[in-house]
């Protein structure tokens, strides 16, 4: 293998990633699987942007629909985690709905300074730096110490990305109550008496699904089955 | 005079002695009777032995297989008739058979006739004590009616009393009744079952399993009264006589009371039982028959939805939530509370229509008394609103027959109003509000302004590092780097292996040359010796200087070696050439010296 081979490999990999990104619109143009999620469908076709989601959330808030407002604020915050307007309006709508303020975790605070997309590129960069440095260390033994430092730097960047992924993993399964009230039952059948009712705009963690019902868990740890139509996942699965 | 007086006294004493001697010499008579001569198993007969005469006779108890004899009393009487002393004794013996049959009791004296006792099998395990019925056994106590309406059994040991609030009821109507069973303390051994109705035209519901127990003094006698409560209902109209029966085990006296002096003396039941005056016997005690008139429910004015409820009831309704979403279920509850036959209280609740989708209701009954006569029956019906808006749940009706008012009644609940929001699907499908033209309302005046929308958009909200393409790309990249690293490492290892192989081959060749030198030295072959020595040195120096062995020449040795060995190595190279071309021999002593020089250089190589 030539000494220049690793750089060639890196260039080929970057070219592959670039071609995959260009192919994305065709994937995004697929019809939404979830019936009734017309908003998601519209946005999927048009793409998501933080300002558009923020403006949409503001419109829902003004229209007196805090559930949909909180849903879109949360989505906008995913794309722009440092936008103070999103944070302020989300806090305002939650407070107006009588919901307790959210307290971000320590890891979330540490990884909240950039968007997940930025962290993804940082992770790729870290992987590339660590990999190239590891190869160069074999080829240039005289620069072993400098290259070891570069490897550690690349691994650190990769670690930041992994921490961000760990922080965001729960959001993959979170949903917002978009109706005035979402009754929660012991079992996924509609004729059961509700054990408690979720207020609009409250956030829950979703797990199993069965026959139009979702097994949810509240922040307080209460569990039960809520109708799928009463909830909207923060991250649409499509 | 005194002499004559003493003579008279002496004569009287003599007469008395003669009389006494005559009395003692009189014959004793013994007689025995048994009553009754015919009994049943479980009953006892009375054997009375009379003795009469001038002395006391000890009569032994007879011994008959299958009969038990037990002395229960004895009386003694002394009479003076015509100067004769006559002593009469009467001994009462209880005879209890173990089995049925004809038993012969032998005569107590050789001249007295035997007695015969016939014992029939029992014609039933229990006797019936009812109102005015005559018992088979002698009563312990006087029975009869008491002023408070209680009728004791003929033996006075127990009573059954039915307490009813009214004696005219309707078909299906539930009437709470009390059944009291009183037991004279010490005379009733046990209650062997629950009170039972003597009529199939009535039903007894919710009879309490455990009766209430209370002491009670009736007519100066201590009783223990057990009280059961139940709901009585008539099956069909008519006039009936109703009574209750209860199986008991009572203690029955085994002989007529008039003959029992001991029983009269021992009035305490415990002492009587201790002395064996009673035996246990299973009996069934009945209450006095009560006349009940059962009226049919009138057909006039009967509501179409009447389901057989008889009593007094009230109705109310409520809903689980006054605000809801279309498609989301609600629970409509109807509360029927009051007193009556709740087992016949039924309702179909709300029927389905365009506004409400209804499900089968379910009912639960919460009783406020142990009988289930008073309480509340709750019907729960799931409803689903079909349309958004303000919906009204119509009033619910419940029809029943009021026996007090003697007519049918219909209770009606108040209507309920429910605000139904549009379903979630329509919310999601609803177009977003016009953001540009929307004026902030007062509740949301604290919202920060909208942002300018840019063209920068992402295709998915799923974070990039959770997307398959990112994971695939990073995995490929990691694999490529890993593969490159492994390839480089393997190349280095291969190079190292080649060098080691070369050194191993050179060492092997050097050893061969040394062996050849030794052989040539031993054979005195100078040409072979010197050529081998030169080749060994070329191998060694070539490895040291990273050159091919053929390139090692005298000139190179001159240039690179500076110590004393340089001349020796040069000389070896020169002599080897000479030996090859001139054929001059080398002295034996020189072989040894050249061998040492070559060996020293090889040793330096090994050391390095």
Image: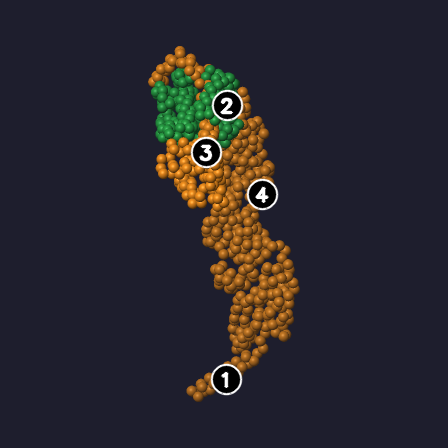
Chain colours: A green, B orange
Q: Earlier in the sequence, mark 2 or mark 4?
A: 4
Q: Are marks 3 and 2 on the same chain?
A: yes
Q: CA distance from mark 1 to mark 2?
A: 131 Å
Q: Earlier in the sequence, mark 4 or mark 1?
A: 1
Image mark 4: chain: B
Q: Earlier in the sequence, mark 3 or mark 1?
A: 1
Tell me: A206 left or right of A103.
right
Q: Characterize the local packing of mark 4: few (<14), some (14-19) or many (20 or more) Cα atoms within 10 angstroms.
A: few
Q: Earlier in the sequence, mark 3 or mark 2?
A: 2
Residue marked by disc 2: B327
Who's the residue at 54% across and 22% down the image?
B353
Residue marked by disc 4: B241
Q: CA distance from mark 3 to mark 4?
A: 141 Å
Image mark 1: chain: B
Q: Secondary structure at mark 2?
A: loop
Residue A228: percent from the left, percent from the top? Answer: 49, 25
Who's the residue at 51% across and 56% down the image?
B187
Residue marked by disc 1: B14
Of the residues tagged 1 and 2, which is closer to the observer? 2
């Amino acid at each position: 293998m030539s000494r220049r081979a690793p750089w060639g490999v890196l260039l080929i990999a970057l070219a592959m990633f670039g071609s995959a990104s260009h192919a994305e619109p065709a994937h995004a143009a697929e019809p939404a699987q979830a019936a009734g999620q017309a908003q998601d469908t519209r946005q999927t076709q048009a793409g998501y942007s933080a300002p558009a989601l923020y403006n949409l959330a503001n419109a829902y808030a003004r229209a007196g629909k805090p559930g949909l407002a909180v849903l879109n604020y949360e989505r906008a915050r995913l794309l722009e985690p440092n936008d103070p307007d999103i944070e302020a309006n989300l806090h305002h709508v939650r407070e107006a709905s009588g919901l307790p303020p959210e307290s971000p975790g320590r890891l979330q605070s540490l990884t909240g300074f950039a968007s997940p997309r930025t962290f993804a590129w940082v992770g790729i960069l870290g992987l590339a730096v660590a990999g190239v440095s590891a190869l160069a260390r074999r080829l240039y033994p005289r620069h072993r110490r400098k290259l070891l430092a570069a490897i550690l730097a690349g691994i650190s960047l990769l670690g930041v990305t992994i921490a961000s992924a760990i922080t965001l993993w729960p959001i993959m399964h979170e949903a917002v109550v978009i109706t005035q009230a979402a009754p929660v039952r012991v079992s996924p059948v509609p004729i059961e008496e509700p054990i408690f009712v979720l207020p609009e705009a409250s956030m829950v963690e979703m797990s199993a699904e069965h026959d139009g019902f979702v097994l949810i868990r509240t922040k307080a740890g209460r569990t039960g089955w809520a109708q799928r139509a009463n909830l909207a996942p923060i991250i649409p699965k499509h | 005079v005194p002499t004559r007086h003493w003579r008279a006294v002496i004569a009287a004493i003599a007469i008395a002695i003669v009389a006494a001697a005559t009395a003692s010499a009189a014959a004793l008579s013994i007689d025995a009777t048994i009553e009754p001569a015919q009994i049943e198993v479980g009953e006892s007969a009375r054997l009375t032995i009379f003795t009469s005469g001038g002395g006391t006779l000890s009569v032994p108890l007879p011994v008959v297989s299958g009969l038990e004899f037990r002395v229960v009393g004895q009386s003694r009487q002394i009479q003076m008739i015509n100067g004769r002393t006559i002593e009469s004794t009467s001994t009462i013996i209880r005879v209890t058979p173990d089995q049925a049959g004809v038993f012969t009791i032998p005569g107590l004296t050789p001249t007295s006739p035997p007695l015969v006792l016939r014992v029939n099998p029992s014609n039933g395990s229990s006797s019936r004590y009812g109102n005015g019925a005559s018992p088979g056994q002698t009563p312990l106590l006087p029975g009869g009616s008491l002023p408070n309406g209680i009728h004791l059994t003929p033996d006075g040991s127990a009573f059954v009393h039915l307490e009813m609030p009214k004696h005219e009821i309707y078909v299906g109507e539930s009437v709470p009744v009390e059944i009291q069973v009183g037991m004279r303390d010490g005379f009733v051994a046990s209650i062997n079952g629950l009170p039972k109705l003597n009529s199939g035209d009535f039903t007894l519901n919710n009879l309490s399993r455990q009766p209430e127990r209370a002491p009670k003094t009736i007519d100066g006698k201590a009783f223990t009264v057990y009280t059961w409560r139940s709901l009585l209902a008539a099956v069909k109209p008519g006039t009936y006589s109703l009574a209750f029966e209860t199986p008991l085990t009572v203690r029955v006296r085994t002989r007529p009371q008039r003959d029992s002096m001991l029983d009269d003396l021992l009035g305490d039941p415990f002492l009587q039982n201790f002395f064996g005056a009673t035996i246990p016997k299973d009996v069934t005690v009945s209450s006095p028959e009560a006349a009940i008139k059962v009226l049919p429910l009138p057909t006039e004015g009967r509501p179409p939805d009447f389901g057989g409820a008889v009593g007094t009831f009230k109705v109310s309704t409520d809903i689980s939530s006054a605000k809801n979403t279309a498609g989301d279920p609600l629970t409509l509850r109807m509360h029927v509370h009051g007193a009556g036959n709740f087992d016949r209280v039924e309702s179909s609740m709300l029927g389905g229509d365009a506004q409400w989708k209804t499900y089968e209701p379910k009912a639960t009954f919460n009783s406020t008394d142990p009988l289930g006569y008073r309480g509340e029956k709750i019907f729960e019906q799931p409803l689903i609103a079909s349309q958004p808006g303000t919906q009204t749940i119509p009033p619910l009706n419940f029809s029943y027959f009021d026996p007090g008012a003697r007519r049918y009644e219909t209770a009606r609940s108040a209507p309920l109003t429910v605000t139904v929001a549009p379903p979630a699907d329509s919310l999601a499908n609803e177009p977003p509000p016009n953001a540009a033209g929307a004026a902030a309302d007062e509740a949301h005046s604290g919202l920060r302004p909208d942002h300018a929308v840019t063209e920068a958009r992402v295709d998915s909200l799923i974070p990039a590092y959770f997307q398959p393409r990112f994971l695939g790309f990073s995995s490929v990249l990691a694999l490529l780097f890993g593969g490159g690293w492994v390839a480089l490492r393997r190349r280095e290892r291969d190079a190292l292996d080649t060098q080691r192989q070369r050194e191993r081959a050179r060492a092997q060749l050097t050893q061969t040359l040394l062996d050849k030198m030794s052989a040539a030295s031993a054979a005195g072959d100078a040409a072979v010796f010197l050529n081998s020595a030169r080749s060994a040195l070329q191998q060694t120096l070539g490895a040291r200087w990273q050159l091919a062995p053929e390139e090692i020449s005298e000139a190179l040795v001159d240039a690179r070696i500076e110590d004393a060995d340089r001349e020796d190595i040069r000389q070896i190279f020169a002599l080897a050439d000479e030996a090859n071309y001139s054929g001059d021999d080398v002295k034996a002593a020189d072989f040894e010296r050249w061998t040492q020089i070559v060996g020293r250089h090889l040793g330096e190589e090994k050391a390095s």
